[in-house]
Each structure stands twice: as structure tokens, then as C-alpha cells.
Image (cartoon, rainbow, N blue to C red):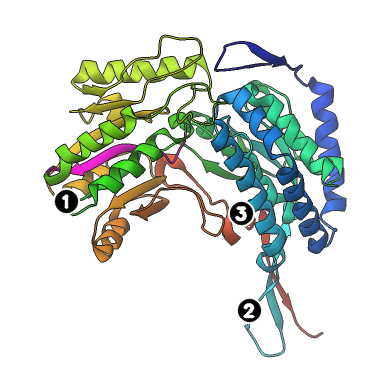
């Protein structure tokens, strides 16, 4: 396994894969360790998570630089990602005991009835490269707090991040068995899922990867949580503040160099403000600084790999061939590194890749509609259902439209992001299950109903 700097195309490091014996050792260590870890009081687990937050905060610059080197994230965004990981650890350190407390249910006089929330066992996480720290901590913090142990199969191009995360848990005092990495290829994942010692699986990634993991886990009757792709609509109604919508739309489309499942991707704009919005969005995106992600002034860095840049350009070219118009950009940058110009497409046919597929890079597709009803219909005309945005100056109207959009989350007049206190996940081809909040920690527990009567 090699990690390649997407800015310079130079090799950063190389890692040996774990052989069959190494994988077996980690599975056995996780299985045996779980029996001890599950018995640790939740207050102990909370205290250890608080320590993880301390380690993250103390080494923020180091971890941010590692992310930027391995996948090209602009350095200021990488630091923000480390801080968010620290916050999710703090959140579950403060709230896990409450979320996992037995829930009393009054059924019959004289009987004690309650629901207990008990851990499942070793949980395998198959995680992506685009948020190499956040995606892992978003799963690991609640899973560990609930009494499970974790096995991480990370994306190969961020293997340095995977090892760093394991070191963070160790530095915070977690036992070695609680969080382990599996340095294996995709061909080994099915074997790990099938192993009786693995009790559940979570994946963040593509629809194809989600289907493969769900199929294998389903054959073994194991619980899964899937957070997959998105083709998120950004709806701009006729009474919207166009300047604000365009500014936030630009940020949402290009944050993390456009490599985000919940980025705005399809801009659905009412005809009354369409021309003004396209002009403002073009100005915002043209004003972005594209370049070295270690530079504090950079807005958009490289894409994480050459194949990702090439695939994105292929989608743009096929969309143009289908009839789309390039308003801005439309080409890779002619320089070292895997850079792609911030791009705007208009006149996009509904069957073109820019409309029907997820564009995982800084490319915005803009669609014109003549009514609120048409905007809702187009927003829902997708196989995905992760996030969505609605822009309007009428708060009640915004809420009403939000309720009509098929998505796991809808934000009105706001940037779509994940919040610790809100359940996060999708519907349709965007997956199932929820992360974060109380719902996230209860995804990987046994909800055990207990009835106790006098003899």
C-alpha cells in the first residue's frame, strides 16, 4: 500500500499489508478483549474518551498536516476536522451514560420492566479517505463508549492517518484490543465480515461498496450501518437572498475540494432568480484560490487521487456531450498534482451524468425551474437521499418545502453539515442507519427487553 501526495504526486510512504496471521491475531484480540471491555463501567469509558479529545487538541497541527499530505485537504479545513473529532469525543464522554441508561417501562404492577442497551462486540468499520479522521471518530467514539471494540479497515491512500488514529487511542489509555487497524485489501473484507467474531459492520463510501458490504453482512445476518453517496439538491426559491445563497452554495460545493457526500451538487433555481444566481455563483467560484493545500490562503486543493480527477472530468465531458453548457472551468489544471478547476454546468439534461450521478469534486450543476412544485420534484428526482438545502426569505415556506424533500437531513438557509446532537444518515441509495446523537450510539447495541417478576 502506498500513500501519494496529491499535490506533488510524490510517494509519501509505503505499508505492508497484514497477512492472514496478522488478521487472525487482531480478530482474536478483539474478541477476547471485548469480554473485558464490555464490563468496564461506562464512566471509565467516558473518561478515556475525554482523554482522546485531549490528545487530539494537543497534536492538532501534526494530524492536520498528515491529512493534508495524504489526501490534499486544505490545511485550515484539516485543522477544523481535528477539532471536530475532539468535540465528538467530548460529546460522548459527557452523554454516553445518559444515552445507555436503562429505560424503565411500566407494564404491570409488581413487575420491573426495562430496556437495557448492551454492546454487540467487535465492529468492523470500512472508512473512506475524504474525511480520514472525522469519519473514523464519528463511528468509533459512540461504538467504544457503548462497550464495543473497533476494527478499522481504512482507505489505502490514508493509511498513515489510520495508524495515527490507532496511536491516539493508545496514547489516551485505551487497551490495545479496543481499537485496531486492519491493513487489508477489499478482497479480504468479505472474509472478515464472515468471521463469527465480528458482530456488526459500518461503512461510509460508494453505493457499490455499500451493496457489497450489505450483501455479505446480510448473508451472515449481521447488523450494518451504511452512509453512502449523495447528489444533494440546493434549492433556491424565488424569494431567496441570492447573494447569501450563492456564497454558501459556492462553499458547500467546493469545501474539501468538492469531495463530500453532503456537498451541494444539484442547484435547483427558480426562474425568477436564475440568471442572477448563476452570475453570483460564477463570481464566487471564479474568486476561489486553487493551489497548494498547505497554504493558508488556499480554498480548493487537489483531488485525492489521479483516478478521481479523471473520473470527474469524464463525467463533465459526457454531460457536455449530452448538451450541458460549461459556464466556468471544465478542465483539469495543467500543473503537477490532481487539481480540477471549479466548474459550473448549466442546461444539464436530466439523464446526463451531472444530473443522474454523484459528482465528487468541485463541479456544480445548475437547473432552472418555474415553480416551487417543480423545484421539489427535481430535488427528489434522484436515487440518493442524504442532504438538501432550501433557500427562501419565508421561514414557514422553507420548513414546508423541507418536509417535502426526500433526504436524511434538510437545512433551510444554512450550510449542510453533520452536527453532534442530530442523527446523521440517508435514505434510498444514500444508505440506512444513523450516526451521531443518541441514535448513533444505539445503532450498535442490543436493545434488550427485561421483565422481572416476584417468584
Estimate the spatial distance between the alpha carbons at disc 2 and disc 1, rounded to whole Å: 49 Å
Estimate the spatial distance between the alpha carbons at disc 3 and disc 1, rounded to whole Å: 40 Å
Mark nearer the viewer, 2 or 3: 3
**Could you tell me residue 327's position as x and y percent?**
23, 24
Task: Identify the element where label 2 is drawn.
Answer: loop
Task: Identify the element where label 1 is drawn.
Answer: loop
Residue at 38% x, 31% y is 358
Query: Which numbered disc flags the more N-terminal residue, 2 or 1?
Result: 2
Q: Mark 1 — residue? A: 238
Task: Identify the element where label 3 is drawn.
Answer: loop
| Quadrant in the picture for the C terminus | bottom right
Query: Which numbered disc flags the more N-terminal residue, 3 or 1?
Result: 1
The segment highlighted magenta reads 260-271
Q: Mark 2 — residue? A: 105
- Mark linked to residue 380: none
From where the camera sits, is residue 279 visible?
yes
Q: Is residue 148 above or below residue 213?
A: below
Q: How many marks?
A: 3
- Residue 29 forms part of the magenta stretch: no
Residue closest to the eye, 337 or 91? 337
Q: How crowded is mark 3: few (under 14 residues within 10 Å), some or many (20 or more)?
A: many
Q: Mark 3 — residue? A: 443
Amino acid at each position: 500500500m502506498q500513500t501519494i501526495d496529491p499535490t506533488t504526486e510524490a510517494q509519501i510512504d509505503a505499508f505492508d499489508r497484514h497477512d492472514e496471521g496478522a488478521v487472525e491475531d487482531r480478530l482474536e484480540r478483539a474478541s477476547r478483549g471485548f469480554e473485558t471491555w464490555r464490563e468496564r463501567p461506562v464512566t471509565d469509558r467516558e473518561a478515556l474518551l475525554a482523554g482522546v479529545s485531549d490528545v487530539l487538541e494537543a497534536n492538532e497541527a501534526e494530524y492536520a498536516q498528515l491529512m493534508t499530505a495524504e489526501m490534499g485537504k486544505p490545511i485550515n479545513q484539516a485543522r477544523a476536522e481535528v477539532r471536530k473529532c475532539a468535540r465528538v469525543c467530548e460529546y460522548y464522554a459527557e452523554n454516553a451514560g445518559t444515552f445507555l441508561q436503562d429505560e424503565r417501562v411500566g407494564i404491570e404492577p409488581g413487575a420491573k420492566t426495562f430496556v437495557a442497551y448492551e454492546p454487540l462486540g467487535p465492529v468492523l468499520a470500512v472508512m473512506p479517505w475524504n474525511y480520514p479522521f472525522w469519519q473514523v471518530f464519528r463511528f468509533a467514539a459512540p461504538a467504544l463508549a457503548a462497550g464495543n471494540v473497533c476494527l478499522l479497515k481504512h482507505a489505502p491512500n490514508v493509511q498513515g492517518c489510520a495508524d495515527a488514529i490507532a496511536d491516539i487511542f493508545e496514547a489516551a489509555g485505551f487497551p490495545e484490543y479496543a481499537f485496531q487497524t486492519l491493513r487489508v485489501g477489499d478482497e479480504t473484507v468479505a472474509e472478515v465480515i464472515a468471521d463469527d467474531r465480528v458482530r456488526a459492520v459500518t461503512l461510509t463510501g460508494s453505493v457499490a461498496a455499500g451493496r457489497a458490504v450489505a450483501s455479505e453482512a446480510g448473508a451472515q445476518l449481521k447488523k450494518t450501518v451504511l452512509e453512502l453517496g449523495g447528489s444533494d439538491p440546493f434549492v433556491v426559491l424565488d424569494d431567496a437572498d441570492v447573494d447569501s445563497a450563492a456564497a454558501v452554495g459556492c462553499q458547500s460545493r467546493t469545501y474539501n475540494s468538492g469531495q463530500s457526500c453532503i456537498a451541494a451538487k444539484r442547484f435547483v433555481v427558480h426562474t425568477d432568480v436564475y440568471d442572477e444566481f448563476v452570475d453570483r455563483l460564477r463570481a464566487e467560484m471564479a474568486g476561489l484560490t486553487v493551489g497548494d493545500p498547505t497554504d493558508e490562503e488556499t480554498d480548493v486543493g487537489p483531488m485525492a487521487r489521479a483516478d478521481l480527477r479523471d473520473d470527474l472530468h469524464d463525467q463533465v465531458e459526457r454531460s457536455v456531450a449530452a448538451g450541458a453548457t460549461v459556464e466556468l472551468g471544465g478542465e483539469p489544471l495543467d500543473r503537477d498534482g490532481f487539481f480540477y478547476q471549479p466548474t459550473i454546468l448549466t442546461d444539464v439534461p436530466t439523464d446526463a451524468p451531472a444530473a443522474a450521478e454523484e459528482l465528487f469534486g468541485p463541479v456544480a450543476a445548475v437547473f432552472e425551474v418555474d415553480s416551487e412544485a417543480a423545484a421539489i420534484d427535481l430535488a427528489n428526482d434522484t436515487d440518493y437521499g442524504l442532504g438538501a438545502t432550501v433557500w427562501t426569505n419565508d421561514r414557514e415556506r422553507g420548513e414546508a418545502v423541507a418536509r417535502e424533500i426526500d433526504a436524511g437531513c434538510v437545512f433551510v438557509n444554512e450550510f449542510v453539515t453533520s452536527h453532534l446532537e442530530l442523527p446523521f444518515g440517508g435514505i434510498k441509495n444514500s444508505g440506512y442507519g444513523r450516526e451521531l446523537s443518541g441514535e448513533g450510539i444505539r445503532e450498535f447495541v442490543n436493545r434488550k427487553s427485561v421483565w422481572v417478576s416476584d417468584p
